[in-house]
Amino acid sequence: MAEVVTSEQAWSKLVRGNKNFVSGVPEHKHQDAEKRRELAVEQTPFAAVFGCSDSRLAAELIFDVGLGDLFVIRNAGQVLAETILGSLEFAVEVIGVPLILILGHDQCGAIKAGIAAKEGTLAAKGEFIHNIVNRITPTIERGLALGETSIDEFTNRHIKDTVQEMTEKSLVIREAIQAGRVAIVGAQYKLELGEVHVVEHRGKI
């Protein structure tokens, strides 16, 4: 994506693509055989997306882009971990993406599980499910302390906390933001509407 060189351009491209998706008139770019051959040599995505694994959160569709446009990392509840940070640092330092998008969504099962764990009603027994939930419950606790009660509020709180944690833990990402090379956007996707709403950002968009 040689035409995308700044965080503002990258975010503008995502916004335009999401409008196409919402309006039901996607362009479906970069999905042909010629593009596949081009990408076999090198990838040059214009943004990194760290999102929830929910099957309804397919970034390439939501933003009407194609092969090689986005560097996508996903797990349940977009819970930050060392492997996630390492992947994002690779996107910033090696690939050179100008934008990181943290993408949560409404009615998130991981957020609901965090609420259930706090209330003592979590039904899931899996050890590794609990590892994920345990990373989310501190956000629920902070939200409750601030008077937040809805899933939507907790989701936004989790997105904000993830932006903060990412910039605190990764020197590579923090310095890239300070130098103006990278911006982070935390956003919530609305499942029924298809819209992406900004919750918080660092850097220029």
Image: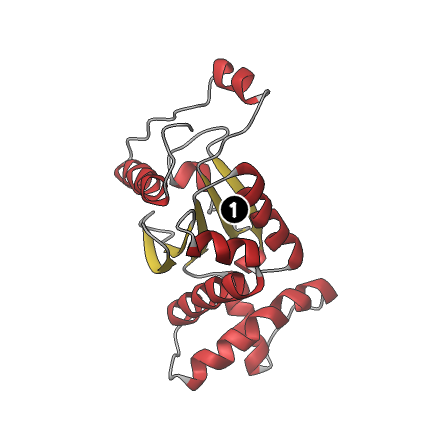
Q: Position of residue 30 (x, y in %)?
A: 43, 23
- Residue 151 sits in quarter: bottom left
Q: Quadrant of residue 16?
A: top left
Q: Considering depth in this image, is 169 or 57 the residue closer to the camera? A: 169
Percent across and percent down for residue 31 are 46, 22
Amino acid tagged 1: Ser
115 and 36: which one is in front?
Answer: 36
Residue at 63% of width from left, 65% of height from top?
132
Question: In what quadrant of the picture does the N terminus appear?
Answer: top left
Q: Residues within 10 Å of mark 1 (few under 14, many from 20)?
A: few
What is the tally of numbered marks visible in this picture?
1
Give the answer, above or below, for where 196 lies relative to 47. Answer: below
Task: Answer whether residue 102 is visible to the viewer in this image.
Answer: no
Q: Is residue 150 above or below residue 97?
A: below
Q: Is residue 195 visible?
A: yes
Name the residue carrying label 1: 55
Kindly identify the residue that appears in the image at 49 percent across and 58 percent down.
174
Which residue is at a point 54% across and 37% down the rendered structure image? 95
As helix, strand or loop, the secondary structure at mark 1 comes to loop
Q: Is residue 42 left or right of residue 124?
A: left
Residue 28 in the image: x percent, y percent? Answer: 38, 26
Please report the residue visible at 38 percent of the width from the left and 39 percent of the height from the top: 63
Way the structure is coloured: secondary structure
Residue 122: percent from left, percent from top: 61, 74
Residue reaching furthest to the top = 34
Q: Residue furthest front?
A: 179
